[in-house]
Image: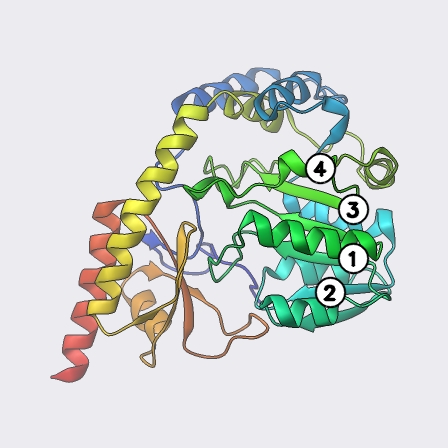
Amino acid sequence: MENIHGGDIYRNQVQLDFSVNMNPLGVPKAVIRKLQEAVNVVHTYPDIQAEALYHSVANMLEIQEEKILFGNGASELFMAIIHGISPKRIVIPVPSFYGYLHAAESSNAEIIYCGQTRETLLKALTEETDLLFLANPNNPTGETRGKAEMKALLSHCKERGIVVVLDECFVEFCEEDLSMLTEIMEYPNLVVVQAFTKLFSIPGVRLGYLVCGNVKLLGKIRRQIPEWNLSVFAQKAGSACAKEQEFVRKTALFVKKEREYLEEGLQKLGIRTFPSKANFLLVYSRKPLYEELLKRGILIRDCRNFRGLTKGYYRIAVKTREENEALLRTIGEIQWKEEK
């Protein structure tokens, strides 16, 4: 089976993994403690209503609990959205996260691809469109859309009855406040998806959530979620994550500093970088970076299987200074050997 995501450490000898965009600050200690506590209750069923988790996250977001829905990662929620809405025509701007296509292909909908620019996006959003997948920041480019642009897009879709699934899984890594969570009541066609996976470095736990102000729409999606989809580990970890707001603030500052350092270092090595506000960089190089780095135990994301990208595009996660230095040093050594 082809790996269409990063993080394939199971079939490669990897010492440093730059292919997945986890928080370089790691897992908060309080979250680790809750995960350890969960071991003691694995003999019981998890709370089917996830009461403590809903309460904690609702307080964090300052949103009513009934407007939130949790999933086994954002991927489960994307699938639930598709089956709950049953769209006939889906628009996906590219390049973007493969999970949107994976969910869309589980339906009988017509899938339309378009560019990421505002002009091409508006052109694709015809009266026949039922659903739009959009990410802010976008993965794998790291580009962002300001709130004014997002509101204009949401209004355009609202007038045409188009549901907008807005993926904000990387929004907390940005210093600028870009989230549209505060607008859910203004736009009944808006479904915001976020996750604790990347922000708190717990991909093995699997925990995502969506927020929607449209009760009827949310009810359709909720009916697609299986019982007990949230383990005791996910529920305890999520409740702890919801209290880590200072950790989130530190993360945005740390990522900005290290992203700029990494970007400058890559440019000095002759690698083209693209503007990003997230915790990763999209780069282009004619040199076989993926293959050469993997030989040296470093894994990056080869982006050639992203629709809209070709051979030579790579996504590199922002990590700690020590790890970023190791990556730059290794790339420099590879280039030196090639040039000699």
Residue at image location 24% in from the left, 61% down from the top: 264
Mark 2–mark 1 contact, CB under 8 Å?
yes
Badge 4 marks a residue whose secondary structure is: loop
Q: Residues within 10 Å of mark 1 (few under 14, many from 20)?
A: many
- Residue type, mark 3 in image: Asn
Q: Which residue is mark 4?
A: 184
Dot 4 or dot 1, earlier in sequence: 1
- Say which residue label 1 marks: 131
Q: Which residue is mark 2?
A: 91
Mark 1 or mark 3: whose residue is earlier in sequence: 1
What is the spatial separation of the Cα atoms under label 3 and label 4, in whole angstroms?
A: 8 Å
Residue of label 3: 189
Q: Quadrant of residue 22?
A: top left
Front in this rendered view, residue 239 or 139: 139
- The N terminus, quarter of image: bottom right
Numbered mark located on residue 148 in the image: none
Instruction: Give, as a three-letter code, the residue at label 1.
Output: Leu
Can you give x and y, in whole percent of width and height, for residue 297 in the image?
30, 60
Is residue 169 found left or right of 323 in the rendered image? Answer: right
Task: Look at the image and tell me whether residue 209 can be seen.
Answer: no
Q: Label 3: few (<14), some or many (≥20) within 10 Å? A: many
